[in-house]
Each structure stands twice: as C-alpha cells, then as structure tokens.
Amino acid sequence: MAPLFDLSVYRGEPSPEDILAANTEIRRHELAISSIHSRIASLLTEVAQLRVEEADHQAAIRTCKGVTTLARLIPDELLAQIFQHCVADGWTLAPVVVSAVCSAWRRAARAPRVWSHVYVNCSAPDAHARTRYWLGMARAAPLDVTLVSVWNPTWQLEELMDLLVQHSPRWRALSIDSTSLYQVNVLLARIALARARTPALRQVTIQTEVHFDETVDDGATDVVGLADALTPITAPALTTLRYVANVAPRTPIFPAHLQHLALVVNESPVARPLSANDLLTALAGVPQLRSLTLSMPLHYEHPYVLLPDVDRAVILPLLTTLTMYGPTDLNELLFHLRAPQVKSLHLRSLEDMGYRQQPIAPSLLWFLESSSPASLAAESEFASEPAPDVPLLPPSEPGSASRAVPLELLELHDIDVSPEAFVRIFRALPFLRELRLHESSISGGTLRALHGPRGLCPRLARVDFRWCGHLSGRALVVLVRSRLPDWGRAEVDGVDAGGRTAEADLEEAMGVEVLNPGAAGLSSGASGDEPRETAVPFEEVAVINCCFVEEQDVLDLARLTTCRVVLREDADDYCRTRDCCGNVRYRTRLRLKHMVGMPAEARAQMRLIV
C-alpha cells in the first residue's frame, strides 16, 4: 500500500495541512472499523440462530433414531442381561438410570431378575422405602442381598432386616459389610429370631471389624449369630462362606454344613494376636469342608502364636482343595491339619525371603505323610478312637502308592525348600499330576528324581516353572525326553535337531556320565524291590522368566511336548493378580527371531504357546 504522506513529512515538523489530512484519514479508518464490528455482530447473531436450528434438527434426528435404535433390535432378555452385568460391576442404580434411556430399556427394566441384586445402604435416608420398592420390582426372582452398615441405629438395622426376612425364601446370596461387629450380630439375630428359612441361599459373605471396645461392639468378640441364623435346617443349600475380618474368630462360629470356606484375616494386633489355636478351633467346627482358603496378614503387630500342643490336629476328611496365603510361618499350621482326600494344595507366601524357608519342608512333609489314609488309621488306632470315614485308595495301586495322599496339584509360590526336601515331597506324591513352582531354587539335579519311566511322580504330566533361577533349559529338555516312550533314541539315530544326543544332554545337565539311559530313572527312585508305575509323558511344560532357560531350549521343548511361555488363561493363575510374570518383550523377540520365516513344516512340528 502506498504511503499516505510523503516520507519527508515524518522527518520534519508537519504543517497544519498535514495534521488535518492525518486526522481525516484516522476518522475514515475508525468508521470502517465500526462498520466491520457491526457486520461481525450481525454474523454472530446469524450463527447463533443457525446453531439453534442445528440443535433442533439434531433433536429431531435423535427422536427419529429412537424408532430404529439398536436397543429395539436386541431381545429383552439380552438387555436384561446387560442390566445384570452393570449391577454385578457395582453400579447398583443401573435399573433406575438406564431405564430412562428409551422405551426398549424401560421395557427390559420390567424384568424381575433385573432387580434381583438388592443393595441396601443402611445410611441412606430413604433406605427402607428404596428397599421395599426394589423388592416389589423383583417380584418372585431370586435375590442377591447386600447390606452395608456404618454406625447405624439398632432400630434402623432391625427394621431393614425384618423387611428383607419377609423375602428370605428367595435369597440366593447374602452379603453383610459393616464396620461394627455388634451391628453384624444385630442383623444376624433378626434372621434367627424370625426363624427365617432360606432354602435357596448358597453363598454368604461377612466383612466386619472387631474394635476391642465395649462401648463400640457392646463387648462382642465374634460373630456369634452366624451359626444360629444359618443352620442346616434353615439354610440347607448353603455351601460357600467368605469371612473377612481384622482378627481370626476364637470360637466355632461357622455353620457346620459349609463346604467352601474363605477366611481372610487382615491384622494380628497385640490385643488379640493371630494364633494357631484360634484357627484350628474355627476349623474344627466345619468338618464337611471341600475347599479351604486361608489368607493371613503380611505384617504383624504381635508375632504369630504357635500351638503349644504339638499333637493337636484337626481332621477334614472331605477337603479336596487347600489354599494358604500369608507369611512363611503360617505354613506351620500344616502340622496340625489332616486332609486324607486333598487333591490340590496351594501354598503362597506374601513375602520374598530370598532364601530357603526352613520351617516349610518339615510341616509340608508332615502334612503329606500324616494325611494319608494309612497314617490316619494308624493314628486313630493308637489313640483308641475310630478312624474317620474316609474311602481308601484303590488297593490295586502298587507299593506305597496305595498308602499315599491323593494330591494331584502342588503349587509353591515364593516358597522354597532344599533339594533333599523336594525329593522327599516327590516320593510322597505318587498321584501328582501338576507341579507349579514360583521363585524356587530347584535345579536340574533335583529334577533327576523325576527322570525316566521309573522316576518319581509317575503321573506328573504338567509342570510350570517361573522365576526359577537355578534351573537350566537343557535339564528340562532331558527331563521331558526321558519320559518319552523311546527315550535314548532321538528323532534320527539318537540325535536331536541340534545335533546332540539325549545322553550328552543328560551328562551336561546333571554332571554325571550316563552309561545306560534306561537306568537313569531307576537310580532316582526308591528301592528296586518295590514295583512302580510307569511314568507318563509330559503333556505341557511352562517356563517363564527362568534365566538359564534359553530360547533354543524352549524350541526343543516345543518339539517334544506343548511348551508355554505365557500365563495360563484360567482365572486361578495367581500371577495375574500380582502382575509379576509379564514377559511381553521376551515373547515378541522369540516370535520375531525364530517363528517368523520358519518353514511351514517346521512350524507344524512346534507346539509352542507364545
């Protein structure tokens, strides 16, 4: 744009004519700016009007889409199932909120089972009216009742429980979560007082806290009303109980006909330390248990109190699954337990000691040996008492197998024992089918006891090793190969894909010279005079984060059997909850380095789960 004035004007004093011309130009530009502002305001007004029109059209579109909404195409049963998933995830108001979306959701909300999860917050001002409305909408559907209480008046608790008791025949699950042990007893007392029958009740959860203060819990020290409220007569279908508290119960408070018990203790205070006597007293009252889970605190204000009477024992004749979480010393409770039908044993320590825990091996071995039917019969005969009614193992089993505990799955998580103890454990478990070790110092020399067709644990078909820093990959390859029917003869004249013989692998892994491959398994067993079952081949080997198991070892294992380097898909994999065995980078490298570009014929021979 050309300058408004000659440049000489800016170098000297302007004349009156120059000043007048400048002011005239300024007024002209100001008028132009005012005109622009007016146009902008007019356009903004028009934009606002257009946005209003757009919103009207969007509302009309939403209204029209309501006719063809996906919810109208989904069956009401599936919509009701979505409701139930929302409630199960903790959204207790889902039936009320989602039913306001459209008519299809409102129609689905009329299904009685949508309202089957009755969540009662005793502290809510309209708790009674809301509970009554919920029960009415549920009609005749089974009820999953949850009560949450935080320092509520006794009369309010009684009023709510009396309302729920009227529908007790429809109870399917009952959960009581209260910060006061006294309030839990008040709620359970109303059930016992009404003599309410709960024929469909299968699962109960109690979560509470003991305060050791008479002004808070009215002198109560245990949930004393649980067994009275849920007797075998009033609750015949009750099988499962989960009890969570800061201290363990001191008396047999659980219903005697329970089959599955999960006992979670969060503290060991000085006023009431965790003791073996309390645990055994509580377990003595539930002789029909099929599964037992004990979860104890990691840190103690008062040390764990051992049982003075070393001969005291609790027999659980029907127990098949035992799971114990907690510090290492908790496993000494195994000294006092007898489970002649146990099939799964999970010992999981919450602390990583970094060394072998000495008390574990004696208690575990004593539990395995004393739980055998033969040991129980001898113990009962010595005590001049009748032996428990436990079916013995088939007499056709040869040798000591007929007198052993029928354990099929053993898991030791962050629990380690000596090589000698491992061999004794293997010798005591002829029926073992699956072994899971996490953070163990087991070595190839220890695994030699399992070698060959006459090795220990002849039915062992699945092993899972994680963070086993002393275990070599060649030892695993030799172990798997030794149980194959043609052990000693590799794919081509005794030579594997890497050009190594089975004998050479065994010599390297064990540090011994193998003169007769078939005798290696016999040397690891018991006396040769005792007939032994022929060992089965391995069905699956899992190795995760074992530093001396190399990639070539994994590939060799995958050629012999199914080899897995990833967590199991089932929900009982404990490492999924702890997130301790993630190996994504290792599995990615394994795929890119060895699997990509591998011929189709070679990949067809690999059974690798990666």
Image (cartoon, rainbow, N blue to C red):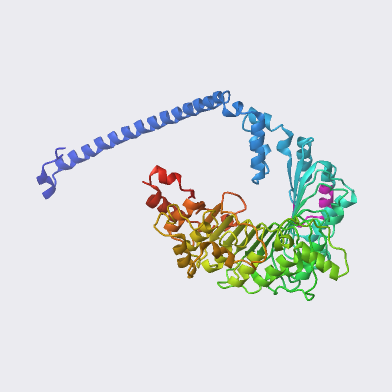
419 to 610, vertically: above or below = below
Residue that sits furthest to the left in the current view: 8
Residue 156 counted in the magenta span: yes
Say left or right for 238 vs 446.
Answer: right
Task: Specify whether 422 is left or right of 401.
Answer: left
Q: How many marks?
A: 0
Range covered by the magenta-colored residues: 148-161
In the rendered structure, the answer to whether residue 168 lies left or right of residue 363 reads right
Q: Measured along the vertical axis of the image, is residue 609 above or below residue 56? A: below
Task: Using the image as rendered, state which of residue 34 and residue 83 is in the foreground.
Answer: 83
| One can see residue 212 in this view | no
Q: Position of residue 449 (x, y in %)?
A: 58, 66
**Residue occupying image coordinates x 30% and y 36%:** 33
Residue placed at 57% from the left, 27% from the top? 69
Indicate the quadrant containing the N terminus: top left, top right, bottom left or bottom right. Answer: top left
Quick check: is 123 in the magenta stretch?
no
Can residue 131 be seen here? The reply is: yes
The quarter of the displayed image where residue 112 is located: top right
x and y percent of residue 593 in the render?
A: 38, 52
Picture coordinates of residue 318 (x, y %)?
78, 56
From the viewer's perspective, is residue 36 above or below residue 130? above
**Percent of width and height locating residue 191:** 86, 50
